[in-house]
Image (spheres, helix red, strand yellow):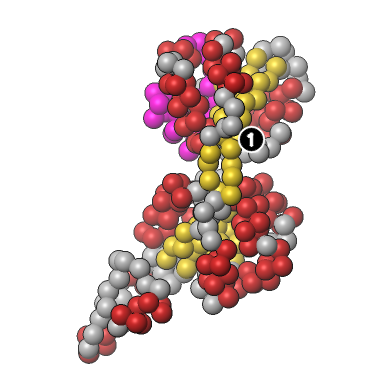
Amino acid sequence: IQEKVKRAKLIPPAIIVVGKVVKLHDKLDWFLKKPLSGKKILVTRTRRQASVLAQKIEELGGEVYTFPTIKIAEPLDHTAIDSSLNKIKSYHWIVFTSVNGVEAFFKRLQHQKLDIRSLHGVMIAAIGVATGRALEEKGIIPDFVPDKFQAESLAAGLKEKLSKEQRVLLPTADIARRVLEDELRSIGVYVDKIDLYRTIPGEGERDTLLEWLVNGEIDIITFTSSSTVQNFIKILEKENIPLLKQAKVACIGPVTANTAKKLGLKVEIEAKEFTIDGLVQAIVEP
């Protein structure tokens, strides 16, 4: 049994059934009747964030393979960040585009011996529900969240609320798209973009990934951002993309899906609502 467990690479929790009781499988088959029962799903988020998506998949009967393709790291230089935080009241709006941005912002704010009182009078925008929820956990209810959770919708909504020569602080990642920044500047708004965190390759091991793919162990690969796709391909290497033919690619929204397509992936599942819940729902739907 020990050798079989090793060969199958089973990890806890697991149950070993010995004897004729296995014949009751069909009668006691409660687990395999869930929507994602029998599906092996690869989660490519950061190790810390993977648990949210993994939990939702497991609750629906899916088996999660965790393969972090990105990792969040501190910026190499905090000078520009600290400069913006020390003049925080000069901004009319602060626009958050990710949960990671919220966490990094308030961590650095605290480092500067500041708290939410320093944001009095500043309007706050969030790109989506998850980012808005992260702000609420910090004691701030966002003044604006777009109906569609992407930079284009956020920019369109803010254009209606901003006036020429107003100042906007955009705390984001070092590799963030420039859509929001460029759109706001096009109407005469001053935008200070600060790179609050770096997105670097994650801890997923290439050999492990190749083994899973060669053995046909993965049914669905999930991507929750363009950076997860880009780093996944870097780790996998382009010549190994044909190994993905047995697995369906699921993306959280059109931006991530377009990145995947440009890198040679076939996207078969795309969330209608650009959230983790929306992604899970898209995976469950036939």
> Does residue 97 appear in this view?
no
What residue does disc 1 label? 174
4, above or below 60, in the image: below
Q: What residue lies at 70% left-to-right and 51% top-to-bottom? A: 258
- Mark 1 falls on what kind of element? loop
Please tell me which residue is depicted at 59% across the width and 45% down the height of the picture: 200
Where is residue 128? Give x, y as percent: 53, 36
User: Is 121 colored magenta in this rendering?
Assistant: yes
The residue nearer to you, when weighing 131 against 102, is 102
Q: Quadrant of residue 236?
A: bottom right
Q: Residue at x 36, y 82 (%)?
A: 4
Which residue type does callout 1 highlight? Answer: Asp
- Eyeballing the image, is 92 above or below 1? above
The residues colored magenta run: 120-142
Image coordinates of residue 89 in percent, x first then y, are 54, 10
Residue 105: in magenta span: no
Q: Residue at x 59, y 32 (%)?
A: 76
In the picture, the quarter occupied by the C terminus is bottom right
From the viewer's perspective, is residue 268 above or below residue 106? below
